[in-house]
Amino acid sequence: MRFVVIGGGPAGLRAASTAARLGAEVVVIERDVIGGAANLWDCIPSKAMIATGALVSRARRAELLGVCPLNPEVDLKSLAIRVRDVEERLVSSGTSQLESQGVRIVRGSGRMNGPHCVEVCSSGEPVETFEADAVLLSTGSSPRIPEWAEIDGDRVLTTRQAYPPPTIPEHLVVIGSGVTGVEFVHMFSSLGSRVTLIVSRQQVLPAKDPEVAAALEADFLARGVNLAIGARATAIDRSTLGVAVRCDDGRVIEGSHALVCIGSVPCSEGLGLETTGVNVNSGGYVPVNRHCQTNIPHIYAAGDLSGRLPLASVAAVQGHKVAEHVMGLHTHSHRHLDYDKAASAIFTEPEIADVGLAEAEAFAVGRKIRVTKVPYASNARALIDGEPRGFVKIVSDPATGVVLGGSIVGSHAAELVSVLALAVTANLRVIDLAESLFVHPALAEALAEAAE
């Protein structure tokens, strides 16, 4: 089986590794680094900076834990070195893994030249060609830049120009209040910037539970973040001193820098898909079925390009499933991906994580549910750590007790939600959580309490 992967991000890396282990002859074409944008620009560097910001915030609250007041300062040069070191370690690990499995890694841009032919290009010119029995398209996405936002990399930035920036902005105006936007608000406010967040809807995180969004808004206000609710940015004026963001309601918000965080667009242009007959929808995404197959059965798409959940974790599992399908393992017992049961997290402070059915979503469709909730403030470990903010909420079926979903706001929410994700995926009941013998004192005890 000759399997060619175009794009070595989370989906491509996992697909290549799994297919090689199963005996395929695998080629990965990657123009940047193994791990893709997740390692180079998005997930990993942002979370590395957030970890630094969280340490600074915690140090400033050290007096609450009986430590003399601390006032740490961020060394941007050291921070940049640290971020780069984390990236390089992950890239090296992923590259070594593939090479040890016999996967050939080819540097360049991949594109289709017919249903079974993949070209590798450098500077726009073909340099090598591969015949493939199966192809995975996993080229990811890039930040969406509206026509009214002229990015200069100095005063007006995209997320990929902020890891870290040359200087900590004096006053950062963040445009976009989705997951990426709120993470950057948290990050830069922790690092010492004054921050204004432009919120086009009536709450931050418009796709999330209103109670979750309200908890995050309260934290932002406590930090001194200015929330411009109900304002949609329409233009950015630059000067040598800063920026002025104009909004559709007449408000003008001035700052030293602007950061544009309004979603992403799939990287489907230049892939030569017109030579294959692969369908591309109006948004530039490549539609797939439950096996991640396109309309051309031997050509697959995964990760952000597939238009499914834009999460690195989802992309990796998609890649694994693609490799199994390519190698014929779907003819055996096979569990299909259920995107409605994917866990997600937002690395703000407090952290936010959720999985499965949300309370507001259930009410919107008239579904009967049971909702139970406990505050972090009642948990011994949260009080010991000086982190009493937040709550655990579990949504279950009132008739069967099966866990349908849940939300967590608080310290280590991204880790705790894994327990709820397992419960949702395995159709466990609330009694299974309530009667689990968790460690004491531990934050996980809040899950058992919320399940009672």
Image (tube, helix red, strand yellow):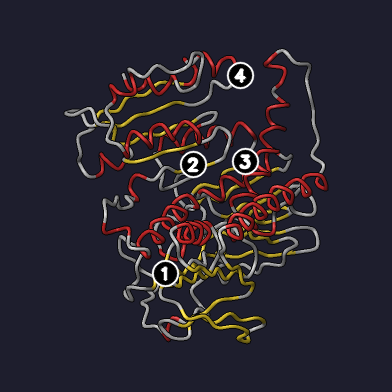
In the rendered structure, are the residues bearing label 4 and label 3 in contact, judged by CB atoms less than 8 Å apart? no
Q: Earlier in the sequence, mark 1 or mark 2?
A: 1
Q: In the image, what residue occupies the spot 30% across and 58% down? A: 330
Give the residue type that dot 4 points to.
Gly
* Label ID, residue 186: 3
- Kindly identify the residue that appears in the image at 47 percent across and 30 percent down: 416
Q: Amino acid at mark 3?
A: His
Q: Which residue is mark 1?
A: 285
**CB-based contact (under 8 Å), mark 4 and mark 2:** no
Looking at the image, how many numbered discs can be counted on the residues?
4
Residue at position x 64%, y 53% in the image: 253
- Check disc 3 and report its element: helix, strand or loop: helix
Residue on which disc 2 sits = 345
Secondary structure under the numbered disc 2 in the rendered image: strand
Other-residue count near label 2 (Cα within 10 Å), few / some / many at <14 / 14–19 / ≥20: some
| Quarter of the picture holding the C terminus | top left
Q: Earlier in the sequence, mark 3 or mark 2?
A: 3
User: How far apart are the alpha carbons under marks 1 and 2?
Assistant: 24 Å
- Name which quarter of the figure residue 132 lies in: bottom left
Decide: is 233 above or below 382: below
| Circle nearer the viewer, 4 or 2 | 2
Seen in the image, is 327 located left or right of residue 78? Answer: left
Residue carrying label 4: 386
Q: Secondary structure at mark 4?
A: loop
Q: Earlier in the sequence, mark 4 or mark 3?
A: 3
Q: 10 Å neighbourhood of mark 4: few (<14), some, or many (≥20)?
A: some
Q: Amino acid at mark 1?
A: Tyr
Q: Residues within 10 Å of mark 1 (few under 14, many from 20)?
A: many
Nearest to the eye among marks 3 and 2: give it.
2
Mark 4 in CB contact with mark 1 (< 8 angstroms): no
**In this view, the mark in front (4 or 1):** 1
